Amino acid sequence: MLEFRKDDLYIENVKLSNIAKEYGTSTYVYSKQQIVNNYESYKNAMGAKEGLICFACKTNSNGNILKILSELGAGADTTSGGEIYRCLKAGFDPLKIVYAGVGKTSEEIEYALKSSILMFNVESFEELVAIDKVAGKLKTKANIAFRINPYVNPDTHSYIVTGKKDTKFGIPYEDAIKAYLTAKKKKNINIVGMHFHIGSQILEVEPFIVAAKKVKKIIDEVEKNGIHISYIDCGGGLGIKYEPGDKVPSPKNLMSKLFPIFDKDKKFIFEPGRSIIGNAGHLLTKVLYRKISGRKSFLIIDAGMNDLIRPTLYSAYHEIVPVKKTGAKKVKTDVAGPICESGDFMGKERMLPLIEQGRYLLVTCAGAYGAAMSSQYNSRPLLSEVLVDGKQTKLIRKRASYKDLTLNEIE
């Protein structure tokens, strides 16, 4: 939903420079239509298959964005009690909420059970015991799936690989049968599914196929022991196009390869996050200063690593473009923020015009793990967020003030 019209960059039908002038910088800007389109690509790919598209709300948990997805009929993939709370507040049907995460507390388990969510994706034997205990206390049964680690190592950043051996996630592959047989004996546990999730920003379908085939073997063994698996939760992980050369598989590519692996009676859950919101959100920022240091050229902007940590944390690439075309000569430059860290940058050695102070840049595809991972490091207030819908703009999170920095401190 980004395009240049003459010399100005638009998001939907709104000029980005106008958003900067009205709401200030730095600001996260989202396209509602892009969110809708991305979700519908999953829904259409699912076709007649029974199941759920559960938005991985850890990628972006703004209530307005969650509400768009809940109104489209999406489910929610959650990883904390707080995310369950946000999703319920945004109108998600609790029977469309799944709860993953390796460190669920007893309080969070109780909250989830009282909220009547669809199921827990259980990641350890001790977690199973905890869920059984809390469910017993509440005189109810907990629906569960085990998250099985299929030992598949996709080609992505090591920090976002979750399905290879020796990660903290899931039940080890060799212990999967034992986990289900153990759960079968628990009085307060109802086994409904099996879950696998191998990582994030994956640009090939093959790793999903390998993982699915390994999980199918476990399902066959489990069902021989009288345990019926209704839901196959395939997790998320499809990547988006960050760099010009990236080739991205579609949800249809993925599902058309996974469905035939499993029996026809199975229901499917997919948990996309980045591929729903990643390319629908962008970080709008202003050039504060230009400088030369040694042999390097710098554009110093008003967005820092506290606002978008992905480039620093993952060495992630985000395309950076001026929101107004200029005839200025392009030079190799680093785009750096104001934080007191050498690792504070948005991009290194980019071919960009040394645009004037006060002009605006857009750091693209920052909708996932952008605002959601932002912090107040260097005592910098959290940014505003703006939703664009056609010609309309809406402030969906106000810019924090200096007073907000000390809001919960006790003197």
Image (cartoon, grey):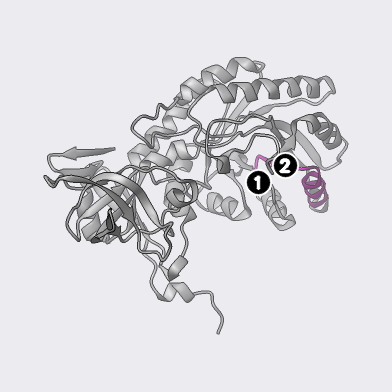
- Which amino acid type is shown beneath numbered disc 2? Glu
Magenta-highlighted residues: 116-134
For this view, does 132 lie left or right of residue 49?
A: right
Which residue corresponds to mark 1? 101
Question: Disc 1 and disc 2: Cα gap in Å?
Answer: 7 Å
* Position of 15 relative to 174 (above/below): below
x, y percentage for residue 402? 39, 74
* Position of 79 relative to 378 (above/below): above
Q: Which of 261 and 96 is in front in this view?
A: 261
Q: Is mark 1 on a helix, strand or loop?
A: loop
For this view, does 124 lie left or right of residue 268?
A: right
- Residue for point 58% across, 20% down: 258
Is 125 one of the magenta-colored residues? yes
Q: Which of 72 and 42 is in front in this view?
A: 42
Q: What element carries label 2?
A: loop
- Residue for point 47% across, 21% down: 252
Which residue corresponds to mark 2? 123
